[in-house]
Image (spheres, coloured by chain):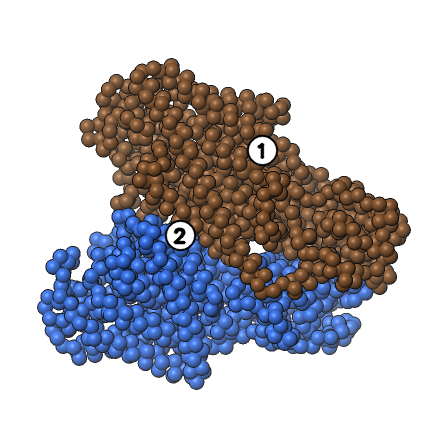
Chain colours: A blue, B brown
């Protein structure tokens, strides 16, 4: 802030005791490119100008707004369910045709030809997906859940919600899943849902000229956050046909802020998804969807009769849950290492990404095709409920290389889509169909293959691989226990999937509901709850939730809700870093432009000085985006005076609306003449006059609670003593990051206050 | 604050521009007695003294704390499920014996004798419940859900969690429900669960000498809040055997603050409930529980086969939901009026309370016994699946006054426990058993009787009456539609219950899950979601959720999460009221005692003045409870100086722990000598040095967001200009109450900013 109005140099007003700048955690890896990370503005900027606008809004406008928001939730439900359905339809038909063709060749014993067709089809599909991802929308790689979770926490990584990302996510995922890679559809569906919601909320894609004016109500981060939460819930609802599971997933795993009005809206979106899917499946059951309908859209329907279990079954189930938790944490550990290794490879160039994807595809094809040859052929059971060996696509008795009247049990699991494999494992009538060695081989294959496959440059989910791995683990345990338990092997597979999901994803209520909705049996509930509790507890002792690990690798500055113990030992004054840039209430254009060009801050305190005020006093906080809007509007004052109401009337509220993510104006695009640079701007009407403030003696822990619970982007730090300048500094998300704090105070990380691995409830 | 240390008069330091005191909403009706309302301390008081204590805590202590908290969740689950089971067992046996005896008399056609036995038994049971409630624990009256909900919002109404309340709640509810009143068990179970949790958390009941030292970790409001949330979830889980429903009920309806660690803990508690109940029911199914086991512990199991529904069924279901919502809002409207009338009667004295309860009991007995005589006798169906007419207690074909081979369909509904009536209505095999007029009579009876019965002075829930009324409404609609729909009448009853619940209680996800767990059929999900959405939307247009209405009648200052529009027009400086009482960092005992005696504030700002500081400066906030602890400890200083560390070592952290609710020390109990009154106390180490502060120019809306989201009891308001004293005032919960604000600014209530009835999403 200049010392006088004529001074064009931006000299910091305050004694800059702390010159350290916060350089950590300002960039993230999105689609393995380094991107600058920005925070989102969830706080309502209560400035004079917008208050005028609110007063002018009629009841009609308000109702229009409410109606529009509900309408968007409805559209999100419709669009996401249609995408989810199309996705399943496409995968079932693409992969189905592939399996039918190769199976027919196998029946004719043309093994090498079958392998060639199988491997080449897979390679082409994978190559297509990875080329699309690498060159069109790198942000579409991976599951997308970590990105959406970070977004809902207030971290805006660019391009994650753009139209190309959406298109690549859908097509790439269909292609990669059809290519028999061991990856899932659920994570990408969550990202797709969030993308759809974000694009609808910002009124379409400006870059591609697809915009709708009547969506202009939602050009702010708060509404977009609500709708993105709806979208991610709809994504889970559409991938598992689990509307309640979707609501709870959004609540438990995705969202960082929660209001009961939002719960209701999410419930509405997922209800729409449930109804649309039900109607579409009714259509498909009549056989109009090609190969889809027999296999597709997983609902496993394990038991329609009562599941009975007794006291003696408790111990094996507890052991299953315990080791499931351990396996889950090992899975997370290995996956993290592999992702770090891949990131290292990806730095060498885009060709390496494609090459790795192709290598994984070929490796997968070899395993899927080759491993069943290791299994011995089983004679068909006399009382089989379905044809043995299977002729068409789905069914438990794949003939593969076996002689007539025999089937290959490993092929039924491994040479199949993941959905069908899960169905076979969960099935209650298959207790003697699979040899335990086959299930073991399948488990090991899935475990390692899914770890290797997740990191490739293509849209890839984690849910289905984890479920299939867990189901084979559970089935294997069930077989080992055998007749010592009353539970059948299908039920063990369900519980195994629960334990592995609990160990890897660490959710409770939402996983429970998703699994119940998948298996359609509420009587499993008490057991499922116990299994999830144990596996999560065990796994939490070793490492974090898989999505949090991925977020950390990607570098998202995610704010957790718990407080690290050392934060209680620090005050905000200890971590706030300079240099601080402040504006005067009525500021010279030249100063503004200079400050904007030389810093990358997104909020600037506005301080009134004499003669505007008897003593320097904090007026408010103005956002960079709003200043840029003012500069572009070019309504300047020739002398330092306040805007009158007629000048204010020239501005419209929607000019200050937030553009879509990553699409803000830049100071470099604003061209101003020499004359204009010497004019003035009255920042008062556009400053948020009610910014949240803390005293510099406030403990960091409590400031974090305020920041996190209220969902802020900036906290102003004010001095304790009144004889100081009215502002000490600004806290942003990055100032709360452990890396930053421990960087400023290395001694803390060695102190006994270092966080215990096991999360302590009173700290959270 | 005195102007000098020798001045014993407590003169306000600040120019008291605002002399209005906040007198509204400081008392509540609990059990129809007027009680002072206090707020709870959810904020961690970060003072020097406690920081010392934390540093001293070893890892063992921390693990002990974590372990204890999980152990308590476990105990809550165990105890609540045992209580829930006992409750059901007792009701089924008490009411069962009564119905068997009267039915046998009816079989012998001794009608007047049967009526006499029925009415007198009911009267005695009701009288017992109401005497117990009125004289032992008035706070046990009603459902208890509003009290628990207010507690979780931070409102502490005394006695709601005391041991007598717990005992009366359990026994009184068993007695009243067995007395055939149209009241429920679920609400009282929620209160019971919360009571159990609170008593465990405060280490037992001090008043009755039942305390455990090893529970001392949880003598603070934060931990108690967490455990009470667990307890209320366990209550719902135990009453409906719906563990997930319990979790979601606690989340959606009860809790005001939510953390994901808490979700996990609640999930654990309800899992324990589910497992214990399952084991106990296994015992009862083998016939060891008297009349229980045939009827008890409602799980309706409507459909184990697939429910099929088609496009043509959509319109009737939508209409059902629409009118269900309207009926629900009428129900809320009438219930509110009746409760206000009852409160007016109750002011006349305790005899009137008992009299009203007896009158309702006699009226109910007359209706239940008399109405079936209006119904015509139906011939027994030839293909009845069960005996017709019924001989024992449960069954659809009550003989009543009918000739042999006939049954009275209205008696099967009305002359029965509510649980059995619901079972009969939900049943899928009873499409032709009930005449539509009988169902209509039953619906009207339930509707009005439950409105009249809720307000009596006995523990009485609302869930079951609402379900039974809704089920009869749905069944009636189903019968009117008849063969125009593919759905059977039992399914309509389920959807009718959903619509009436949605219209009255206004929950979404939790009701959906509770109903699914009750009916044990996931395929109803999409329909249930639509019904709940419509009925809630329709009903919300007219009035508020039933529990919010009751909380308003009781006078709890509940803080809603949405912001009223006029709050954006006000600053905190506009509403903060005086007189403000502040203490100096080192204060004279006499001043402290005088201030404590003349005010009833619960927090006092601590301001350092010269010579302690160069200028008056805010140090922190000290709680009345902590000052009282200091005064009782009598460690005083003979001159105004700071405590040294050896003096500090005389204090122990658990002396500052919060006692159980309504059991704090009082200043009147502290006797000090003249000499002691002239000594000093150093308040610094015991003051919360990190209180949350807002500038006086902060908008009230944003201050409310801070207050509500962070869960505060006090916000300090600091001046904008530095030449003013360091503090403008204190905001508490009552300052945010609409009655208070509109009392200060009557013009706002007439402005167009008055809140629209339909809740606007961007305001919440």
Neighbour class for label 2 at 10 Å: few (<14), some, many (≥20)?
many
Residue B529 seen anywhere in this rendered image of the structure: yes
Taking the image as shown, residue B23 lies to the left or right of residue A36, namely right
Lateral position of residue B106 relative to residue B206, left or right: left
| SS at badge 1 | loop
Residue A75 can be seen, yes or no: no
For marks 1 and 2, give the CA distance.
40 Å
Return the residue at label 2.
A244
Say above or below: A524 vs A614.
above
Give the residue drawn at x 24%, y 70%: A437
Q: Position of residue B557 (x, y in %)?
A: 62, 42
Badges 1 and 2, same chain: no
Residue A10 position within the rendered picture, expressed as x and y whole percent measured from the top left? 72, 75
Q: Chain of mark 1?
A: B
Quadrant placement of the N terminus of chain A: bottom right
Q: Position of residue A213 (x, y in %)?
A: 49, 58
The residue under label 1 is B137
Q: Is residue B620 left or right of residue B210?
A: right
Chain letter of mark 2 equals A
- Residue that sits furthest to the left in the current view: A404
Query: Can you give x and y, in whole percent of width and height, for residue B133 in the image?
Result: 55, 30
Residue for point 86% across, 61% down: B611
Nearest the eye: A73 or A556:
A556
Disc 2 element? helix
Residue placed at 68% from the left, 47% from the top?
Answer: B732
Q: Is residue A344 above or below residue A646?
A: below
Quadrant position of residue B36 = top right
Q: As displayed, is residue A735 above or below residue B603?
A: below
Residue in the foreground of this view, choosing between A514 and B702 = A514
Tag shown at residue A684: none
How many numbered circles are shown?
Answer: 2
């Amino acid at each position: 802030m200049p010392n006088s109005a004529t001074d064009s140099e931006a000299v910091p007003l305050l004694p800059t005791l702390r010159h350290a700048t916060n350089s950590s955690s300002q960039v993230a890896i999105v689609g393995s490119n380094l991107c600058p990370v920005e925070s989102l503005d969830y706080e309502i900027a209560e400035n004079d100008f917008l208050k005028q606008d609110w007063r002018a809004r009629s009841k009609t406008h308000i109702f229009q707004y409410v109606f529009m928001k509900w309408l968007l939730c409805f559209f999100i439900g419709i669009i996401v369910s249609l995408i989810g359905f199309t996705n399943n339809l496409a995968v079932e038909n693409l992969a189905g045709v592939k399996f039918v063709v190769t199976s027919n060749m196998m029946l004719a014993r043309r093994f090498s030809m079958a392998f060639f067709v199988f491997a080449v089809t897979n390679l082409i599909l994978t190559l297509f997906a990875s080329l699309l991802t690498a060159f069109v929308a790198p942000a579409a790689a991976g599951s997308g859940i970590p990105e959406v979770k970070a977004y809902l926490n207030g971290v805006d990584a660019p391009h994650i919600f753009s139209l190309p990302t959406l298109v690549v996510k859908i097509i790439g995922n269909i292609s990669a899943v059809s290519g028999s890679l061991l990856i899932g559809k659920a994570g990408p569906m969550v990202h797709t849902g969030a993308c759809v919601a974000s694009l609808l909320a910002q009124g379409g894609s400006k870059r591609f000229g697809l915009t709708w004016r009547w969506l202009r109500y939602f050009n702010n981060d708060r509404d977009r956050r609500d709708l993105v939460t709806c979208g991610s819930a709809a994504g889970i609802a559409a991938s598992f046909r689990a509307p309640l599971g979707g609501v709870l997933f959004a609540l438990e795993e995705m969202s960082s802020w929660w209001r009961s009005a939002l719960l209701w809206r999410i419930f509405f979106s997922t209800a729409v998804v449930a109804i649309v899917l039900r109607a579409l499946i009714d259509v498909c059951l009549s056989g109009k969807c090609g190969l889809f309908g027999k296999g597709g859209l997983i609902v496993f329907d394990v038991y329609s009769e009562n599941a009975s279990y007794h006291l003696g079954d408790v111990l094996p189930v507890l052991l299953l849950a315990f080791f499931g938790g351990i396996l889950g944490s090992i899975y997370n550990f290995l996956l993290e290492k592999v992702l770090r290794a891949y990131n290292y490879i990806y730095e060498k160039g885009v060709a390496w990404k494609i090459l790795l994807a192709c290598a994984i595809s070929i490796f997968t094809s070899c395993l899927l095709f080759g491993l069943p040859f290791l299994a011995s052929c089983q004679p068909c059971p006399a009382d089989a409920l379905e044809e043995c060996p299977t002729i068409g696509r789905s069914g438990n008795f794949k003939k593969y290389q076996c002689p007539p009247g025999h089937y290959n049990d490993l092929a039924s699991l491994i040479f199949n889509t993941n959905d069908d494999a899960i169905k076979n494992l969960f099935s209650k009538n298959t207790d003697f169909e699979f040899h335990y060695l086959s299930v073991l081989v399948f488990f090991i294959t899935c475990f390692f293959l899914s770890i290797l496959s997740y990191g490739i440059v293509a849209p890839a989910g984690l849910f289905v691989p984890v479920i299939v791995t867990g189901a084979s683990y559970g089935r294997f345990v069930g077989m080992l226990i055998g007749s010592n338990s009353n539970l059948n092997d299908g039920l063990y597979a369900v519980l195994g999937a629960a334990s592995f999901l609990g160990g890897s994803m660490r959710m409770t209520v939402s996983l429970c509901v998703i699994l119940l909705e998948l298996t359609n049996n509420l009587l499993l509930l008490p057991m499922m709850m116990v299994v999830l509790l144990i596996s999560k507890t065990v796994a939490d002792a070793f490492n974090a939730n898989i999505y949090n690990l991925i977020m950390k690798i990607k570098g998202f500055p995610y704010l957790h809700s718990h407080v690290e113990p050392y934060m209680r030992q620090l005050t905000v004054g200890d971590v706030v870093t300079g240099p601080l840039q402040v504006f005067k209430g009525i500021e010279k254009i030249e100063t503004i432009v200079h400050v904007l060009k030389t810093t990358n801050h997104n909020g600037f305190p506005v301080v009134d000085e004499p003669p505007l005020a008897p003593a320097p006093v904090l007026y408010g906080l103005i956002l960079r985006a709003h200043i840029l809007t003012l500069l572009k509007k070019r309504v300047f004052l020739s002398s330092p005076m306040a805007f009158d109401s007629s000048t204010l009337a020239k501005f419209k509220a929607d000019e200050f609306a937030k553009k879509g993510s990553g699409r803000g104006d830049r100071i470099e695009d604003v061209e101003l003449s020499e004359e204009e640079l010497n004019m003035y701007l009255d920042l008062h009407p556009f400053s948020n006059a009610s910014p949240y403030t803390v005293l510099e003696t406030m403990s960091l822990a409590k400031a974090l609670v305020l920041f996190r619970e209220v969902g802020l982007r900036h906290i102003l730090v004010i001095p304790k003593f009144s004889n100081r300048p009215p502002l000490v500094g600004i806290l942003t998300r990055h100032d709360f990051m452990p890396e930053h704090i421990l960087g400023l105070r290395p001694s803390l990380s060695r102190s006994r206050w270092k966080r215990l691995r096991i999360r302590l409830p009173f700290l959270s």
